[in-house]
Image (spheres, rainbow, N blue to C red):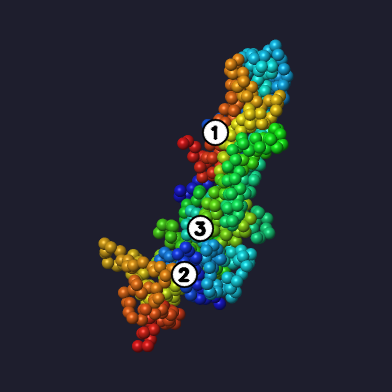
Amino acid sequence: MTDTAIVLPRARSELGEILYHLVRDPLGLAGLIIVVAIVGSALLAPWIAPYDPVAMNIPDRLQGPNAAHLLGTDQIGRDTFSRVIWGGRVALKVALPTIAGAIVFGLLLGMIAGYGPKWLDSLIVLLFDTLRSFPTVMFALAVVALVGPSLNTVIFVIMVTSIPTYGRVVRTLTQSIKQSEFITAELSLGATVPRIMGIHILPNVLGPLAVLAAMDIPTVVGLEAGLSFLGMGVKPPTPSWGVLLSDGYALIRNTPWLIIAGGIPLILTTLGFTFLGEALRDVVDPKLRGKGGK
Amino acid sequence: MAVLDIRDLSVSYSTPRGSLRALRNVSMTVPEGKIVGIVGESGCGKSTLISSIIRLMAPNAQVGSGEVRFKGTDLLARSEAEMRALRGTEISMVFQDPMQTHNPVLTVGQQMVDIQYRDKKPKAEKLKRAAEMLALVGIPDPEARLNQYPFEFSGGMRQRIAIAMALMARPALLIADEPTTALDATLEVQIIKRLKELQDEIGCGVLFISHHLGVIAELCDEVVVMYAGEVVESGTVRDVFHNPAHPYTAALLDCDPGHIKVKTRVLPTIPGNIPDLVNLPKGCIFADRCDKRHKACDTRPALWTARAGHRAACHLIAEKETA
């Protein structure tokens, strides 16, 4: 770097800047397209889905893919393609509030633990460790036993078990940023603790956290599918990818199509969000921007 | 009147080995509008001194005694909120490593606007003020550069930005903690010149820490030599550099490559190490490494006056007077 660095007028906003660099990265573009496709089809399910996802059509049951039923039908003749699209709604309905909640609580607890006094830090870390020590499924079983299976139960269980993941990352980042010289420099220029936390630590934490969240969405969707598969999540006839998988598993001797149809969206979601997360990691850091190609 | 008047300051750190006495009875003053240099090798207490002035001390640091009087009132007696109000407005600081002193994810403009949070001015005016300051420290095209991130600047420019931020509120005291150590020699000269010009214009007192003796000689009016947590010599730059009264200062000057006239294979060093600050020696703190050690050195010397305004903590001065 020299004193005569090129002066670029930065006309784009921060978000525009991130988007601009994201679509220039092939991986990021692929991730973005997949994610937009999944989210879009979930949002527009009532218009896109060719059939009612819960309408039975016994004569057409257990068909393979054909012109009328793109992904075939299940044992009571429901259109699998429609069910996959509607299942995306359930997946996102679980993933978004879960991740949002986990980020908010993770940020709050993690930053307090990272910046606050030692005893508070120990207390919060103890809380995180306690939460993490529950196997998610066992915890879910306990909650389901108490309040019964429902979508909200799934959301609650996954959110609570995800908080420590975010909280720990935030705590570690906060601790290391707190030690940086620029924080001391800001303090020596009279910055207050809320300003240090909000203006200086938070933006440094958000980038890595966004990446973590993007990569975590498939895990959450998978967890929802898993819990539904075990019968602890959404109840039939509501279509969910997990329910599709569980139906497909039962009928795997009759037709492989059901389990394939339930698996494809899970794989796509995982790939899409992981690509997006990887690309985001390079893009949110202003220093790595525009240096694409690894 | 002195902007900064440190009286008899002692600071110690509690460590597993016991109390580490990082500063012992340090007294020094920064007169209004003057530049005072502090010299000393690593571990002599420079950083502890600065952090106790600005009151950003490590959690295990304790002030044993003394006062840090800023414009006549003791900073050590102030509340945290009062201190915060002073930082950045009355007392500012420039740090050693310009690559580390800026928030990497915010633009320079955002950071310079942010530190003006105490002013109730519209943002456009704050940006204008930031651009003015950047121009003042010699950054070309300041308006456009406000939109850039710290990594888009070179080290020298970042240090100028740090100086601009520190001087934004025209403080009465600027503490510069080795601001040129991380820069190369040409930049060092530029930054020193600019600092001197700005100091002339703003009229602030400057406490300048460095182990580069040439820089101190160039920039400072007065110099304080510290060794192992004590002030061993203080006086005007001319007196201290031309007639060092303490053997440590003399040895330090001998070791400065700038002073060595004859070609040599081995650079001179001061043999030995600084004493253990947990178990302090009884007598003179420098005695173990001193080539003028004699019997009197087993007792602790006071800061004696060698000539008007020039003081050193060495028995030789007292002996010369009585002789």
Q: Which residue is mark 1?
A: A275
Front in this rendered view, residue B32 or B6: B6
Task: Point out which mark residue B160 bears.
Answer: 3
Graded by Cα atoms within 10 Å as few (under 14), some (14 to 19) or many (20 or more), the crowding at tag 2 reads many
Graded by Cα atoms within 10 Å as few (under 14), some (14 to 19) or many (20 or more), the crowding at tag 3 reads many
Is A49 rendered above or below residue B34? above
Is A261 rendered above or below residue B196? above
Host chain of mark 1: A
Q: Which residue is mark 2?
A: B21
Front in this rendered view, residue B112 or B13: B13
Host chain of mark 3: B
Circle 2: residue type: Arg
Q: Could you tell me how far apart the alpha carbons at marks 3 and 1 are, in whole angstroms? A: 40 Å
User: At x 61% / y 33%, what residue is drawn?
Assistant: A223
Front in this rendered view, residue A33 or A202: A202
User: At x 34% / y 67%, what residue is drawn?
Assistant: B272
User: At x 57% / y 36%, what residue is drawn?
Assistant: A215
Quadrant in which residue A190 is drawn: bottom right
Q: Could you tell me how far apart the alpha carbons at marks 2 and 1 are, in whole angstroms? A: 55 Å
Graded by Cα atoms within 10 Å as few (under 14), some (14 to 19) or many (20 or more), the crowding at tag 1 reads many
